[in-house]
Image: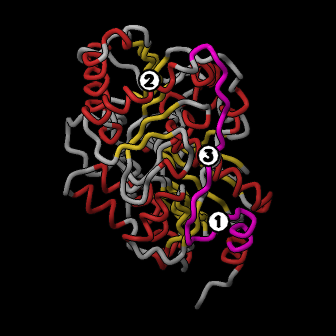
Amino acid sequence: MYRPLLGNPLRPYGQRHLFPDVTPVATRADRNPRPRLNLVLPTLHPKHIFGGITTALRTFEGLAAALGDGFDRRIICGYVPIDLETMAGMPDYRLVSIGSPYDAFPRTVVDVNDVDSGELPIRAGDIFMPTAWWTATSSELFQAAQGRYHGRELPILYLIQDHEPGFYGWSSNFSMSRATYAHPDKTIALINPEELANYMLRHYALTDASIVRYAANAKIRGALSVRKRERIILVYGRPSTPRNCFETLCAGLSLWQQAEPTVAAKWRIVSAGEEYDPARAGGVYNLDVRGKLTLEDYADVLSRASVGVSLMVSPHPSYPPLEMAHAGLRTITNAYECKDLRARSPNFISLDVLTPDALADALSRAVREAEAEIGRVRPFSEIAALPCPLPDYDPVALAERLRGLVAAPVEA
């Protein structure tokens, strides 16, 4: 029996990682005739939900709503065990064990950490929607099991939210993550957002794809308030995530403070994203490490800050810089292939070469410009859409297509 993995299957023993590994999961045939949309996630725990998982849940629920009551919904979670705090955020869903003899509820959550309880049921009408390369690898194995059990494989809905081979050096994980883009005949790709879609089209033959355009988080947008701007630099600090360039961020802040100590002494730096010991920031002073903020606290600091810094070495724009620019902050970020956020908003300063020196120079410019508006109201700014040759993702059209695929007769 094939045993799909929902964890990172090739993480070396003892290597530090945000989440623990998950024991392999066995599958079994489920003869229930109802079709089902399955979101395959690493976690649902609020502590680990950032922009990518938020977008995945929003996309999943939107598509499920378009499919209507004729489709069940299941969320398959690995890595972090499901607890009461997790399920409190999912009041419409019922937690069931993997091997439950009866899981025919319209909305379920399955914790694959509970591996000893049995085998994951696979229906003929199951459609899997992964959101990361390792959950895509798992979904491919679920898809293959569907073919063995039921005589056909339905396409995987692959929500691509970054170019994940870039997370690794040339390695097994690099190779395996690239391989998830290599089956266009078995995949319907939903690529989020425009910058990443243009990059993926340049490098991969994704023949069945549409674009999930960036949309501002409605809750954050609604929580913003018109406030007088203060001498606050909001930075996105995630030392556990290499692509967010924590070392460059801290070095650039320190260089700016050393070059302009009198000006820098007036400015407070608020770090949002992850908790960490301020000593990890080296010589950066006036630093307030806030970690993962509540929606209200995040909107509050966005409404009062004057300058933002959010770096990411990736073709994905990342959500924090877009949220900062929308809130009216002069926002420093970096360019990448197919990505220049100056096309999104005039509030961006985009670094073509990302070094501490370049960041320090950009901070000097942004702070100098912001000084003229301290104590004044600075308006919010809409984030522009970008051109992309792919069709826009339409949940209603995709739902109609999926209904047709599920209803199609199995070939003899």
Q: Is residue 254 visible in this depiction of the protein?
A: yes
Amino acid type, label 3: Ile
Badge 1: residue crowd in 10 Å (few <14, some 14–19, many ≥20): some
Rendered residue at 49%/68% (across/down)? 143
Q: Secondary structure at mark 1?
A: loop
Pick whichever, 254 or 235, lies toward us. Answer: 254
Rendered residue at 53%/23% (across/down)? 306
CA gap, disc 1 and disc 2: 38 Å
**Left or right of 212: which side holds 277?**
left
Residue stretch in magenta: 374-401
Badge 2: residue crowd in 10 Å (few <14, some 14–19, many ≥20): many
Q: Secondary structure at mark 3?
A: loop
Q: Earlier in the sequence, mark 1 or mark 2?
A: 2
Q: Most prominent secondary structure in the magenta stretch? A: loop
Pick whichever, 332 or 112, lies toward us. Answer: 332
Residue 369, image x and y in percent? 49, 26
Amino acid type, label 2: Val
Rendered residue at 57%/53% (across/down)? 39
Rendered residue at 69%/53% (across/down)? 104
- State the quadrant of the C terminus: bottom right
Kindly identify which residue carries mark 3.
383
Q: Earlier in the sequence, mark 2 or mark 3?
A: 2
Residue 303, image x and y in percent? 62, 22
Up/down of 173 relative to 141, above or below: above
CA gap, disc 3 and disc 1: 17 Å
Kindly identify which residue carries mark 2.
367
Up/down of 301 relative to 321, above or below: above
Q: Do the residues bearing badges 1 and 2 touch, measured as CB atoms within 8 Å?
A: no
User: Farthest residue toward the front?
Assistant: 372
Observer-side mark, 2 or 3, equals 2
Kindly identify which residue carries mark 1.
392
